[in-house]
Image: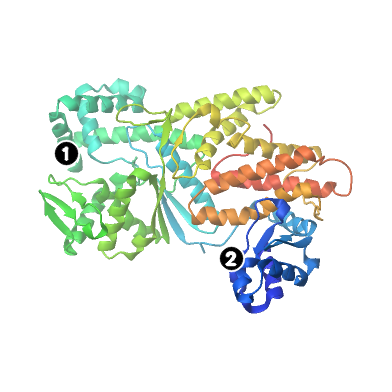
Amino acid sequence: MDYKTQVAQSIKDAIGNDLSLDEIVEKIEVPKTLKMGDYAFPAFVLAKVMHKAPQLIASEIVKKVDQADYEKVEANGPYVNFFMDKKLVGKQIVGQVIEKQNHYGDLDLGHEGNVTIDMSSPNIAKPMSMGHLRSTVIGNSLAELLKKTNYQPIKINHLGDWGTQFGKLIEAYKLWGNEEEVKQDPINTLLKYYVRFHKEDQENPELDDEARAWFKKLEDGDEEATRLWKWFREESLKFFMKIYDRLGITFDSYNGEAFYNDKMQPVIDELKKKGLLEKSQGAEIVDLSKYDLNPALIQKSDGTSLYITRDLAAAIYRKNTYHFVQSLYVMGNEQSNHFHQLVAVLKEMGYDWADEMHHVAFGLITSGGKKLSTRRGNIILLEEVLDDAVKLAQEQIEEKNPTLTNKDEVANEVGVGAVVFHDLKNERLNQFDFDLQEVVRFEGETGPYVQYSHARAMSILRKAGMDEKTKIDVQGLADPAAWETIRLLGDFPDMIARAVEEYEPSVIAKYAIRLAKAFNKYYAHTKVLVDDDEKNDRLALVQSVAIVLKEALRLLGVKAPDEM
Ligand code: ARG
């Protein structure tokens, strides 16, 4: 049901051939306040062709429009304001939500096309950073949104399990390492070695040479290097899995950088054959000056590979394996140069599908205004953030609902959900500061607020002896107090389309906040459970809100407890 098109058709019927239906649709505005109606047509766009004053055109349109289709159509200066028939539209929208349940808003934009999503991709032997959290939750939400619009997402965790840093780590371990210590607390211990390495190599540059030599050995399959690498990788992965479990996020592939070890040589050969490789100070590069980019360094002078070499092999592997219609890379803003180089090299190789690769970039998370960095050791540990968030949620639940039976489970859903929601509420390119107290608040524009609104809707339904699935016969509500909520429910499919087109889960998070606010306002002014003719329709509205809030949260990867 497209109400804008309906309004455009009414205008078209009134004005004849001066504008096409599409042109009218494009001109129609949504007024800032409901007092000005639901849609407004700026009649001044016709002033030139009709040789009349806009005010006059507006009042002529009002006279010609079939008023029976609307609650009211009126001229307001040069605008024609359309007020929809609230009862009728309410019946249609709420009726649809209830009929389709959690499938309300499903669209077929993708025709089942595969979309690979390169996401999370933390680095072995380092803690998962807040940046990796962003990549994980944005990627996961995009996967849900893509599924909802009939694409087939393939979530790939491109683990950082190869590269010169492993040379550094092995060197550090050989110098200061202790097996017992690593076993007790792998990531923190390995991080400690790594940070120490970066401190000491300032004074001892020969440490870097040693590290390079270790990485070379690793790439050449040296037994000891391989054994240590495997061990570091396993320990790290165990730890990452714990975090993924807490977030409830799974992957379709854990093929990280090391997976492409035997797939890089063919790419280098192909580059050579296509005449794209050039020698520069002993290294092999691809010149990208025609793209206004620095040359891509493909192979170092000692023959070792680079991050981009592995990404080239990965991109080609993904195309051949998954035949993707789009290939997404959810990684920080700071990797944009890398990404452009990657695409440019593929284009040079003649791969036009590189145009279907998209960098879903995101901004930095800071803490107290400061940038976080593993090298310098100032990081926020993700596990601690989740633990603290759950603890804060627990305290609030204890205060607000001490008799709740499954407190621990709910606290977990609220605490973890709060962190995820907070991350997704920010437009992904924005930088934002992380303040836990703020994140876990039950009021304001937070995840817990949306969850709480959903739980409140569920509790109203419970009091009426209903739940989300009760089939309510909908007649529609004429009550103006319900209108904002109804209209927002009607917007949900558009929001989904927009979120997918812009790769922007924040569209859904912001929408969920608006819907929760509108619903709370409605609920504050209206007694839903009073026995009168409209009781059923009020309950239908409450039920629709519960369904759509829960579905919006699901698309963000956040749970919606029935009670909290
Ligand atoms: N491991 C990298 C990092 O932590 C991110 C990898 C992103 N994906 C890719 N295909 N390059 O910065």
Alpha carbons under labels 1 and 2: distance apart: 63 Å
Q: Secondary structure at mark 1?
A: helix
Residue identifier under label 2 = 26
How crowded is the residue under tag 2: few (<14 C-alpha within 10 Å), some, or many (20+)? Answer: few
Asked whether, in this view, residue 465 is left or right of residue 295, the answer is: right
Give the residue type at disc 1.
Lys
Which percent across, then down, holds residue 497?
Answer: 55, 57
157 or 399, nearer to the observer:
399
Give the residue type at disc 2.
Glu
Q: Secondary structure at mark 2?
A: helix
Locate residue 130: give its quadrant: top left
Report if residue 82 is visible in the image.
yes
Which percent across, then down, holds residue 197?
Answer: 23, 27
How crowded is the residue under tag 1: few (<14 C-alpha within 10 Å), some, or many (20+)? Answer: some
Whichever of callouts 1 and 2 sits on the residue coming sooner in the sequence is 2
Residue identifier under label 1 = 217
